[in-house]
Amino acid sequence: MSMIQLMTLPPPLVIVPDNLAEAQTSQDYFISVTAKDNKDIQDVTITYTIANKTVSDQQMTQNTYNGNYDYRIPQDHLLATVPNFTFTVTATDVSGLKTITKISTITINDNLKITTISPSPDTSTDCKTLPIGVTFINGGASPKITYTLKNNGEEIITDKEIPVRSAGIALDELGPLPVGNYTATVKIVRSEDGTTMSREWHFTVTE
């Protein structure tokens, strides 16, 4: 009787969310799954394929907060030249029973996008020294970021490079600035394929 019960024990249950977000180039991608068993889970691993490269049997880590199993695909694996990647998850319980999920496909979004700019658009300040910068996504490994600045229509800075401080953040300092109405234009060029994104906005420096 006990042997019959052992043979009919179900394998682990693994749930991969249906609404996984798109991946972004130059950003880590996080995958979280649920794995349960009527005994105990021994381990949960992930295998993923990007282009012609397969990374196999990577250990997923159990999250102490919600019990899910998490894995981070590093940003340098997510290539702008690849439209998607696939993965499967394998859960093994303490008795050796396994479940392998169906193949999941994740789109890699490589659209270059500026998410925030500073100084804030259409604002007025009496501060004469201001940060100028952008945050962005999908800028590639080594984007070139420049800005042009006009005061009352006269160009005072042309195509000055803004240092990239960390992934997706470029920041420089303006000033001291004279009083005036300013127009700033920032441009990002992705080095891998020359994709360009620019943004123009206005701000005012007062007495």
Image (cartoon, rainbow, N blue to C red):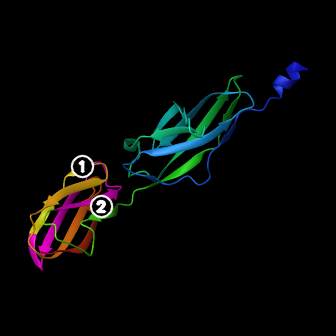
Task: Point out the frontmost of discs 2 and 1.
Answer: 1
Residue 3 seen anywhere in this rendered image of the structure: yes
Q: How many dots with numbers?
A: 2
- Inspect the image, locate mark 2, and give the three-letter code of the amino acid beneath it: Thr
Is 21 located above or below residue 202 in the figure? above
Indicate the secondary structure of the residue bearing disc 2. loop
Residue at coordinates 59% horizontally, 47% vertically from top-left?
104
State which quarter of the image contains the C terminus.
bottom left
Instruction: Tell me the residue that label 1 is attached to.
Output: 165
Quadrant of the rendered image containing residue 162: bottom left
Q: Which residues are magenta?
A: 130-156
Q: In the drawing, what numbered circle is on residue 123?
A: none
Separation of residues labelled 2 and 1 (CA atoms): 21 Å
- Look at the image and say whether residue 155 sits in the magenta stretch: yes
- Residue under label 2: 195
Which residue occupies 50% across, 38% down? 71
Residue 172 is one of the magenta-drawn residues: no
Q: Quadrant of residue 94?
A: top right
Q: Secondary structure at mark 1?
A: strand
Q: Percent x, y for residue 50?
A: 46, 43
Q: Amino acid at mark 1?
A: Arg
Q: Nearer the viewer, residue 50 or 65?
A: 65
Viewer-nearest residue: 82 or 5: 5
- Decide: is 153 above or below 112: below
Q: Position of residue 82 (x, y in %)?
A: 43, 51
Instruction: Work out whether 124 lies above or below 3.
Output: below
Q: Residues within 10 Å of mark 1 (few under 14, many from 20)?
A: few
